[in-house]
Amino acid sequence: MEPFVITASECDCNSAHSARLSKDGYTLSDDLSHETMFLTNVKYIFDGEEDHIDDNTMPETNTEIMNVVVVELDETLEIRNVELISDEYQLLGYSNEADNDLKLTILSEFPAEPAPENGDLAKLVSRYQHQNKHLKHMLEDL
């Protein structure tokens, strides 16, 4: 069985990204919210036969698990379902265009409070409009 290459793409243009400043004090572009993330520090867990797991290729680590992607396959190794367990991201959808490539479309969490340095009312209104747009998009996908 060939391993999957899983990439995650943030599609939300999260309004928090527009409030971020570079170290020079410039506002960072919304283009940064469309970055693709390649999942790292991946551990494979197989349901059923344990002879697929080789202890030499999976060294014991004490890292904290941040996000869990559950990929359910059928007998012919076709993807039946994908689930994301995360405190930071919501899975909006997935696609499997190539044989071993799985692309996740995710929405990142919104910060609970606006940054205090954003004192301009027009910027705050724009930020909340952005959040409402993406919350509506997320609710429509549920």
Image (cartoon, rainbow, N blue to C red):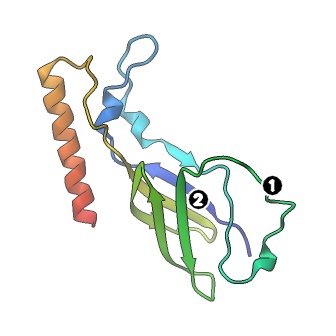
Look at the image and tell me in which quarter the C terminus lies. Answer: bottom left
Q: Residue at x 50, y 53 (%)?
A: 8
How far, Cα to Cα, is label 2 from label 1?
21 Å
Residue 39 lies, in percent from the top left, at: 60, 51
Quadrant in which the N terminus appears: bottom right
Q: Furthest-top residue in view?
A: 24
> How dense is the environment of label 1, judged by Cα within 10 Å: few (below 14), some, or many (20 and up)?
few
Horizontal side, residue 119 vs residue 111: left or right:
left
Q: Report the residue at 25% width, 32% height from top.
A: 113
- Is 87 placed above or below 1 here? above
Instruction: Give the mark nearer the N terminus: 2 vs 1.
Output: 2
Question: Which residue type does callout 1 highlight?
Answer: Pro
Residue 110 in the image, given as x and y percentages of width and height? 31, 41
SS state under label 1: loop
* Residue drawn at 12 percent across, 22 percent down: 121
Q: Give x and y (percent) for residue 91.
A: 40, 60
Residue 135: percent from left, percent from top: 23, 51
Which sits in the foreground, 108 or 54?
54
Viewer-closest of 141 and 99: 141
Which residue sits furthest front? 62
Are the residues at dot 2 and dot 1 in contact (C-beta closer than 8 Å)? no
Q: Residue placed farthest to the right in the image?
A: 56
> In the visual, does 140 lie left or right of 59?
left
- Relative vertical location of residue 70 with respect to residue 34 in this rendering, above or below: below
**Which secondary structure, mark 2?**
strand
Q: Which numbered disc, 2 or 1, marks the residue closer to the eye?
A: 1
Residue that label 1 marks: 59
Residue flagged by tag 2: what amino acid is it?
Ile
Q: In this figure, which residue is indicated by the disc labeled 2?
A: 6
Badge 2: how crowded within 10 Å, few (<14), some, or many (20+)? some
Locate residue 116: give its quadrant.
top left
Question: Residue sitting at 42 percent across and 51 percent down?
Answer: 87
